[in-house]
Amino acid sequence: MNSPVNSQRLFEEAQHFIPGGVNSPVRAFKAVGGNPLFIKSAKGAFITDQDDNEYIELINSWGPMILGHGNEKIAEAVKSAVENSLSFGAPTAIEVEMAKLISSMMPSIEKVRMVNSGTEATMSAIRLARGYTGRDKMIKFEGCYHGHGDSFLIAAGSGAITLGEPDSPGVTRGVANDTLTVPYNDLGKVEEVINANEDQVAAIIVEPVAGNMGCVLPAKDFLEGLRRLCDANGIVLIFDEVMTGFRLSKAGAQGVYNVKPDLTTLGKIIGGGMPVGAYGGKREIMDYVSPQGPVYQAGTLSGNPVAMAAGLAMLTQINEDKSLYTDLANRTKAIEEGFQSNLDELGLGYTMNRIGSMVSLFFTNERVVDFEKAKSSSMEKFGLYFREMLNQGIYLAPSQYETLFISKSITEDLVGRIVEANRTALKAIH
Ligand SMILES: *Cc1c(COP(=O)(O)O)cnc(C)c1O
């Protein structure tokens, strides 16, 4: 391994001109100690830093690169789109094709609006739910992440049943009052909050499989229960599938659990690596979006032709690959089983959660079903583990609260290397 002198120099320079030296906070390695690696290129399952170190990478750009880096069909589609100019700000044929394909893959989406990020998708979906119901409040879950829109940066307050607390300076109390935060997988609490805010709740937004507190699965009947409560109380159910959409199945988590939301938000994979998001759902609700309806939402670069070319090439491949999701699940299961046998051998009782190609190892002996339990994972142990894995050429997300993403480029051979590195790292830190 070369000493990361170039990354070091770039990080020092970056900190003069970019807040914290990064354009998104979790990249800064603050949770694991040390400085971030600056990345030069990636191909397949491998990523190369500015000091020419090569790592097996399990971040997938935080989700999008499910087919591995440098997918040729996506690259070709982007190159040929570029030939026709980068942007028009007018409707294009490829947007229609994209909308049709999304709707055919994810049947709860009858109409869809393209935006430029997951954050934009969730912000717009919430505004739409409020406009549609004529109500102000929303319910979200502790440990779920829905991007950095003001109304999502709210923690459960002391009077959590009726009032939230700003979770970041700059978010107003007024906004906080409209967001109610409930523990994940706690249907009883959701019902209590709905009853305490009768006829005021516009939407419940949830990650149907949580991926932003590590991987946490919905309890049996949790999603069905939310559906039931929304139906009974005239509330819009929003599945935030920015991470799970096209990751867990062609139809996302809703396809796996067979629960239909009213609205779905998408991002990450849908752009094939380009900045894309989308929100869509029931026709009756989507028809409230301008210019058809009164709820305003717009975007100069929305549906950008280069981004659509990348996204369409991604979704087309996913749609046509009959064995993709079983292959990914099998590889990921092999990693899970390998890690488990390492834990058993070392007498460690740590918890693992997995579904499809998402898997998390928590440094706690508790079963992780919500954020409270996820927080029982040892940050210190995770930091040590992260650095040991990196030293062995395995690049994990620099946060305990991320899942590992397995891409199509992770071959059986690489599974073996990852499991072996896990064994060495676990041994080294205990
Ligand atoms: C990543 C993510 C977002 C935010 O998407 P950005 O493109 O980063 O704005 C929203 N919701 C979920 C579930 C996510 O994982």
Image (cartoon, rainbow, N blue to C red):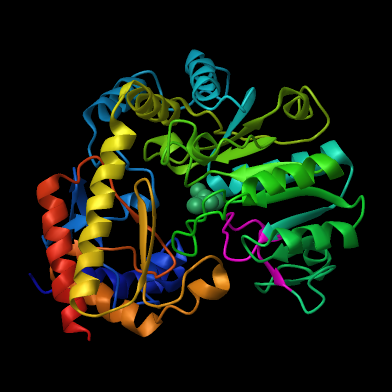
State whether residue 83 is above or below residue 52.
above
State whether residue 157 is above or below residue 395.
below
Which residue is more in the foreground, 19 or 43? 43
Does the magenta portion include 353?
A: no
- Magenta residues? 141-156
Residue 374 coordinates in the image, percent (x, y): 49, 72
Look at the image and tell me in which quarter the N terminus lies.
bottom left
Residue 178 appears in the figure: no
Q: Residue at x 32, y 41 (%)?
A: 66
Spot the residue most to the top: 93
Which residue is more in the foreground, 278 or 240? 240
Residue 16 coordinates in the image, percent (x, y): 39, 74
Q: In this image, 85 relative to 121: left or right? A: left
Q: Residue at x 16, y 82 (%)?
A: 428
Residue 37 coordinates in the image, percent (x, y): 25, 66
Q: In this image, 235 relative to 205: left or right? A: right
Residue 356 coordinates in the image, percent (x, y): 37, 45
State whether residue 273 is above or below residue 345.
above
Q: In this image, 322 relative to 374: left or right? A: left
Which residue is more in the foreground, 238 or 419? 419
Find residue 168 and report its image quarter. bottom right
Q: Residue at x 71, y 58 (%)?
A: 187
Look at the image and tell me in which quarter the C terminus lies.
bottom left
Q: Residue at x 39, y 77 (%)?
A: 30
State whether residue 284 is above or below residue 422.
above
Residue 398 appears in the figure: yes
Find residue 326 and report its image quarter. top left
